[in-house]
Amino acid sequence: MRVSRKKPKKSYVKGVPALRVRRFRTGKEGDYDLTLKLICESNIQIRDNALEAARVAISNYLQKKVKDNFYLVLVKYPFQVIREHKQAAVAGADRYFSGMRHAFGKPSGCAVQARKGDCLFELKIHGKNENFAMEALRIAKHKLPGSYRVERVVAS
């Protein structure tokens, strides 16, 4: 938790930027016999625009291959607010800036702080389309930082 002892009123972020993730559930809900999960292999922070890029990549690929016969859920919500301390990079900037003295920063985006073993995406699909689903998740892995593995869960 971010709590300042000197100035406790400055310990929170006032304005949270707009989320770049357009939707958290994509596809058609229904009874699917296969669930694939994209699992993080390390502790990592993932920005919301990377999550959106991965979601769009999975969705576009599967809509081309299997139409609406899938259900994709983005499990994690980007709560973490990323702040940026902007500094001027011009000649004489040291005369009108206080350096890192007031370096709390302005909100610039949101992120997910994922732990090792956390599920990021959950994809439900029919078993006959498993190879398309695996390829879609492989494409999504390239859009995200860090390393991931795909876990297979068969519905009973």
Image (spheres, rainbow, N blue to C red):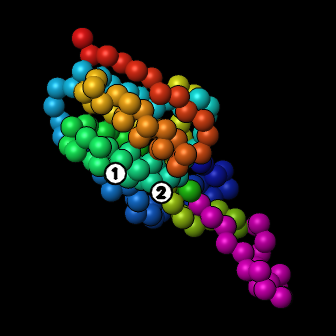
Q: Is residue 149 magenta?
A: no
x 63%, y 58%: residue = 7
What range of the chain is rendered magenta?
A: 83-101
Q: Main secondary structure of the magenta part?
A: loop
Q: Is residue 96 magenta?
A: yes
In the image, residue 93 sits, relative to residue 81, either above or below, namely below
Picture coordinates of residue 93 (x, y %)? 80, 84
Q: Quadrant of residue 29?
A: top left
**Residue 60: mark in rendering:** 1
Secondary element under disc 2, as helix, strand or loop, is helix
- Taking the image as shown, residue 63 lies to the left or right of residue 109, namely left
Picture coordinates of residue 34 (x, y %)? 29, 23
- Taking the image as shown, residue 125 lies to the left or right of residue 97, namely left
**Residue 49: mark in rendering:** 2
Q: Quadrant of residue 130?
A: top left
Between 125 and 17, the residue placed more toward the observer is 125
Which quarter of the rendering shows the C terminus? top left
Q: Is residue 115 visible?
A: no
Secondary element under disc 1, as helix, strand or loop, is helix
Picture coordinates of residue 68 (x, y %)? 20, 43
Between 97 and 19, the residue placed more toward the observer is 19
Q: Amino acid at mark 2?
A: Asn
In the image, residue 124 sits, relative to residue 3, either above or below, namely above
